[in-house]
Amino acid sequence: MKRQPTPIIIQAIATPIILAGAVVVLLAMKDQPELAQYGLVIPLAYLMGSISWGYMLLQLKMGVDVREYGSGRTGMSNVLRTGGVKSAAVVLALDTAKGVVSVILAKAVIGTTAAEVSAGLIVLVGHNWPVFLQFKGGRGILTALGSLVIIAPIAAIIATAAFLTVTGISRYISLGSVIGVVIGALAILGLALANFHSVTYLVYGFIASSIIVWQHRDNIQRIRNGNERRLGQAATKVE
């Protein structure tokens, strides 16, 4: 059944407003009470996560709704199969930036590890369940990685290396993603035990990885059944 997409104009109008709101909060909220800071930073993180770059890009570039192709997701891998490498590269950068900006905002305004973790998790929730697309978004890999780059950069490097290795060998982006986030969470644990960073970051590692693995449950089932799409296979339209 064909889905009715959220009008592109809604996200086109909302996006600059959200980004401007982030700038205002950054400039005006540093010396305000912590509760007020959380009250603005966390909703902004969710709204930034809800900006579905893959959806907007393919609507503007090709006039297609990426949710009607392949996995029905709005993330980079489905954009790659539907719109090609150049479109996927743009989405990769922008989806990663959502996590980076959200955590930097929390770090600059509130300045606690709990705030960083909260913003990282909420932007991930926004990406996966965006308000602008009836709560049907992506799987969260790149947005979670963007947050992790700021929260625990060494763990982010380890997770990325694992993803690239597994994906390169198996040709399954989904398998690389699942193994990458699990290894990333274990890397956060190891680094915390070695006193490289706060143990608070463990909350981010294990909740974010659990969300992402859950979001890949259909991919895991297709891998087991032998019918998961491999890297390079084009997406077909969902009937």
Image (tube, rainbow, N blue to C red):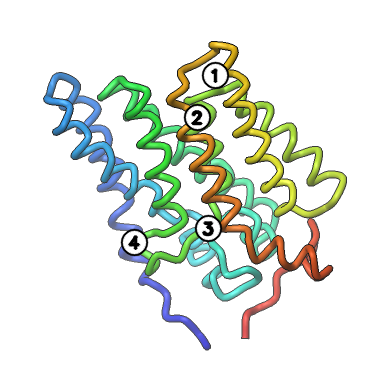
* For residue 72, above or below residue 93: below
At label 3, which amino acid type do we have?
Answer: Gly
Disc 4 residue crowd, few under 14, some 14–19, many 20+, Cα 10 Å: some
Q: Of the numbered discs in the image, which one, if any, rests on residue 131?
A: 4
Pointer 4 with pointer 1, Cβ within 8 A: no
Q: CA distance from mark 3 to mark 1?
A: 29 Å
Mark 3 residue crowding within 10 angstroms, few (<14) / some (14–19) / many (20+): many
| SS for callout 2 | helix
Q: CA distance from mark 4 to mark 1?
A: 34 Å
Q: Residue furthest top?
A: 195
Mark 4 vs mark 2, foreground winner is: 2
**Real-space CA distance between mark 4 and mark 3, rounded to the nearest whole angstrom:** 12 Å
Q: Position of residue 148 (x, y in %)?
A: 52, 31
Instruction: Name the residue beneath numbered marker 3.
Output: 138
Horizontal arrangement in the rendering, residue 23 relative to residue 79 (left or right) = left
Q: Secondary structure at mark 4?
A: helix
From the viewer's perspective, is 208 left or right of 108?
right
Residue that mark 2 sits on: 202
Q: Earlier in the sequence, mark 2 or mark 1?
A: 1
Q: Say if mark 2 contacts mark 1, CB within 8 Å.
A: yes
Q: Secondary structure at mark 3?
A: loop
